[in-house]
Image: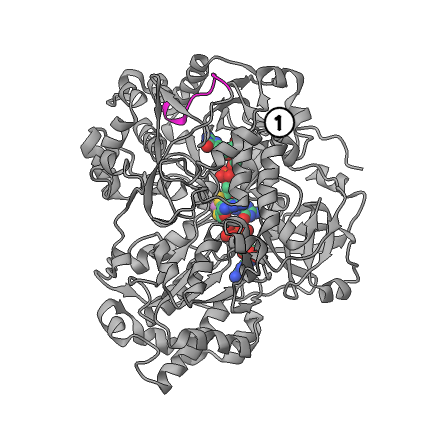
Amino acid sequence: MEKEKKEPAAENPYKLLDLKLTKVEKWAAGIPAVMAAFGDLFEEGVPIRGTRALFRMNQMGGFDCPSCAWPDPDDDRSPLGEYCENGAKALAEEATTKKVTADFFKKNSVFDLAKLTDFEIGRKGRLAEPVYLPKGGTHYQPISWDDAFKKIAEHLNALETPDQAAFYTSGRTSNEASFLYQLFAKEFGTNNMPDCSNMCHETSGTALLPTIGIGKGTVKLNDFYDTDVIVIIGQNPGTNAPRMMSALEKGKKNGAKIIAINPLPEAGLMGFHNPQQINGIIGSGAKLADLYLPVKINGDMELLKAIGLLLIDFEKKSPGEVFDQKFIADKTIGYDAFIKQFDHYKLEDLAAASGVSQAAIYEAAQMLAFKKRIIFCWGMGLTQQPNGVEMIQEIVNLLLLKGSIGKPGAGVCPVRGHSNVQGNRTMMINEKPSNEQLDRIQKVFGFDPPREHGYDVVGVIKAMHESKVKVFFSMGGNFLSATPDTTFTAKALRKLNLSVSVSTKLNRSHLVHGQEALILPTFSRSDIDMVNGEPQFVSTENSMGVVQSSKGMLKPISDKLVNETQIVCRMAIATLGRRSVIDWQRYANSYDAVRDDIEKCIPGFENYNLRVRHKEGFYLPNAAREGNFITKKFGDRAPFTLTSIPENVLAPDEYMMATTRTHDQFNTTIYGLDDRYRGIKNERRVIFMNQKDIEKAGFADGEKVDLFNYDNGIERIAPLFIIVSYQIPEGNTMTYFPETNVLVSINNVVRGSNMPASKFVKIKIKKHNPKIYELIDQL
Ligand SMILES: Nc1nc2c(c(=O)[nH]1)N[C@H]1C(S)=C(S)[C@@H](COP(=O)(O)OP(=O)(O)OC[C@H]3O[C@@H](n4cnc5c(=O)[nH]c(N)nc54)[C@H](O)[C@@H]3O)O[C@H]1N2
Ligand SMILES: Nc1nc2c(c(=O)[nH]1)N[C@H]1C(S)=C(S)[C@@H](COP(=O)(O)OP(=O)(O)OC[C@H]3O[C@@H](n4cnc5c(=O)[nH]c(N)nc54)[C@H](O)[C@@H]3O)O[C@H]1N2
Ligand SMILES: [Mo]
């Protein structure tokens, strides 16, 4: 058995529940989704409070769903609001009336709380008052807000340099709070602003900025309704962006074809019963993917190159009909060198390495060959690969050949994660702010912002380890569990002088903390945000660059919550005092004042206060969307990028593992223990394997195993998983995040974006050894 740990556990307890296998679904949503949505509201004991809120979610003038960043239709919204099962679960998490009070912490030590699973920790309810853990303390204790800000200020002001502090952001923070937060960090004197983008779509931005001139997607929602082909690669919309399914359904109705590229035949790629339409609930629903390509993990580059090779061949046979030669001549650069590169490739080799049959690749190429309106959507399946930047650039290459960017019904669509992660970046939360951005800050506010780039997520973990960062402030998120190499990261966090978490719910990052720690409870998106007796609205930016207002409607569960905007202002006043050139109190009193200054600093926000009050919000400028590719290096042309084929070698006893989300979680928040579409009930410690691999290795379906990673000569262990025989390519395995983050080396990163390559983890699998826990203790 697992031994009693010396320190609060940084990982979920190693215990199995009672796995039941159910049918693997071929359709997403429908009746079970509606039931699950309302079921969660009932489970949280908030059927009326929650249902009322559900009807205001994603309604014009309502509040923005806290779940994903998929946009709402510009017009034509369902009178019930646009919601989905997982949006309802996210809301139930927020709307719960269960509370975590100071009394709760008095009864439960940090050590004991860490013995719970993430699922159990999340069930405890909303954080209701600020608490503080003194050096050597075992229990969090109450603290007043004023004293909390004093503590933060003391620690920050005691640092030798401002760069010994770091300010993390998860992607739910509003534009207004984000802007103030980065402004504070810059005035304090550091660009150490790691954020969840560093684990999410940094790879997309890194790939797109130098090729199309903007690090964001180019399509609008309406483009999905009128297009020829939609390619969905490395993304699971049925679970992670369920409202995207309505757009896919509508596109299909209007004649679009869908190609899905994924090692797993995800239910949400195969079919959809629209839960918001009667015929979707009871009728036959819509078949989604016209073609499913079961690519190997990280086989996408070869697959994309194989499609490119065939398209070049088709173009040779029907000149001018496959490629858009005028677009290539007018808008791009590097075509000849790009085409020449393909002389070295053979279809057989590419197909074999991708894991997809030549016939299927041929079919994909044919579906694309004579069409000009093509949309490519992608998610973490590409961005969390070591060569993710190059793979996305290869997608851009294909779209440039076809003239398929910057026109209606065509373009790139990186499907963002957190509901305001894109807005956070627009508000300049970025460890690498551009000189233009810093110049504007300097001009508007009159102080000299630091110019040196700061730490990103991987960088800050290493810096904490080396005691170069001593104060860590988290605006939302669950840093310990979201980041790689859990054991290494836990050690890093424990070295801090002070860790501060602004949070809505209890999570593991509160339990693995700095020598002193603060938990500051805040509002969620659905809460009414009163300032000076007036309910306020904030604004967010969705995956397609639309800025919209969001106004909460639920009474906060406690009068001891402070909203994120006020938290930043009060921290700034306490820390900077008279050193500051900014009137923080003015911002604390008025969000309009914040928006006025955002307008002065960030292009595209002209008349912000006026336009944000329009019900449908407004689009931010996006030159690439209009067909103008303004790149630093090539002026007004989009370059073709020469990319390379990865060399993937696995030892005979090695497997490739991707970590993914279940249908019952939002990142590290675990809503439930099922993964309904994939046929998993009541267990998270499972590993999906191909039946042939199971037999070859002498394992059995249902057998208990331990997982190991040996990157950089270090043994990393994730004990006690159950093998589930699954339709997945040979040599590939899939497990759930965050349970297997312990296996992801801190040095296993994406080239160019420095993101953890959490979908490219080499593992070994051994029969479960009951003595494994002793080994872990020695690590
Ligand atoms: N309900 C819910 N909604 C969410 C989230 C959530 O946790 N729960 N998280 C939010 C966030 S922050 C984000 S970033 C998004 C994430 O949404 P997604 O991008 O969908 O994230 P994942 O579930 O990690 O994995 C995506 C897919 O990648 C596939 N994949 C793995 N390896 C490869 C590969 O090598 N090639 C290809 N082609 N595919 C591969 C997996 O099979 C899986 O289907 O969702 C957001 N929305
Ligand atoms: N192995 C592996 N690791 C991954 C991934 C993966 O696919 N595989 N995905 C990565 C991705 S895409 C992402 S985005 C990161 C996510 O990393 P994070 O954003 O750090 O993690 P979350 O789980 O979304 O954060 C949940 C916590 O946020 C707090 N919270 C929720 N709403 C609010 C709010 O409105 N305000 C405030 N202040 N706090 C709030 C709650 O306390 C909750 O416990 O994880 C990454 N890690
Ligand atoms: Mo994400």
Secondary structure, mark 1, is loop
Residue type at mark 1: give it: Lys
Q: Is residue 265 above or below residue 469?
A: below
Segment colored magenta: 558-566
Q: Is residue 126 above or below residue 200?
A: above
Q: Nearer the viewer, residue 45 or 5?
A: 45
Residue 334 rendering spot, x and y as whole percentages: 29, 71
Q: Quadrant of residue 395?
A: bottom left
Does 489 appear in magenta? no
Does 562 appear in magenta? yes
Left-right relation of 598 to 727: left
Residue 621 rendering spot, x and y as whole percentages: 25, 49
Q: Is residue 141 above or below residue 289?
A: above
Residue 93 rendering spot, x and y as whole percentages: 55, 33
Residue 204 rendering spot, x and y as whole percentages: 40, 54
At x 42%, y 53%, the residue is 203
Left-right relation of 323 to 739: left
Q: Main secondary structure of the magenta part?
A: loop
Left-right relation of 396 to 618: right
Pointer 1 residue: 124
At x 20%, y 29%, the residue is 446
